[in-house]
Amino acid sequence: MSYILDALNKSEQERRNRQTPGLDSRHSAPVTALQSRSIWLLLLVMLVVINGSFVYWLISEPTESKTATTIAEQAQEPSVEQVTTPADLYKNPTPPTIRSILPVNIAQLPTSVQRQIPDIRFSSHIYADDPSLRMVNIDGRIFREGDIVADGISLVEISEDGVVLSYLHYTFEMSILRDWSFD
């Protein structure tokens, strides 16, 4: 008998669901305009806070500032007392600190420094995005970044076009398309 009552109640309920709601039917509370505005306002505030945090993170990110000296400052002729020879570097094992500067072309170095740089002949040049794969053949020997090429000349970087070398306190670049010889 309870099966029959359950079936009758179920069919009555289905019939009521198909009809328009009456006074005795239960309704959920409608969402007011104030509630929907507060939800959108909350989402807007959250979006502004997230974007503001992102902008702050971008601005406060420490940037690498490179100290660039002008070509005129680098090209100043050192006095006779200031000229350091490769022999002086071997006597004093602590090399002078190399300033973080933008390299200049080797032709822009002071004449006294250019005279001290030995002849350099390039045979091959391999550039890759991975610095460990870069190499250059100078005077028949293979060198990688950080190697000493000749008397006091160190290979700072191998670029797509050539090499960046340092000698004494000068940083200069050379194209691999031309060999170096002071005329």
Image (spheres, rainbow, N blue to C red):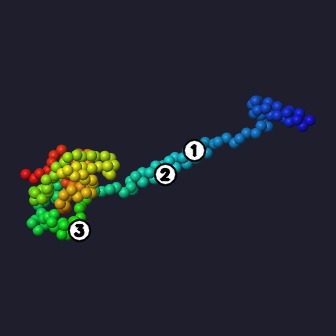
User: In the image, is 156 to the left or to the right of 62?
Assistant: left
In front: mark 2 or mark 1?
Answer: 2
In front: mark 2 or mark 3?
Answer: 3
| Element at label 2 | helix
**Vertically, is 66 above or below 81?**
above
Q: Residues within 10 Å of mark 2 (few under 14, many from 20)?
A: few
Q: Amino acid at mark 3?
A: Thr
Q: Which residue is mark 2?
A: 49
Determine which quarter of the picture holds residue 155: bottom left
Front in this rendered view, residue 10 or 181: 181
Q: Which residue is mark 1?
A: 37
Report the residue at 16% width, 67% height from top: 88
| Element at label 3 | loop
- Dot placed on the residue nearer the N-terminal end, 1 or 3: 1
Q: Which residue is mark 3?
A: 94
Front in this rendered view, residue 73 or 159: 159
**Residue 175 at x, y percent in the picture:** 19, 47
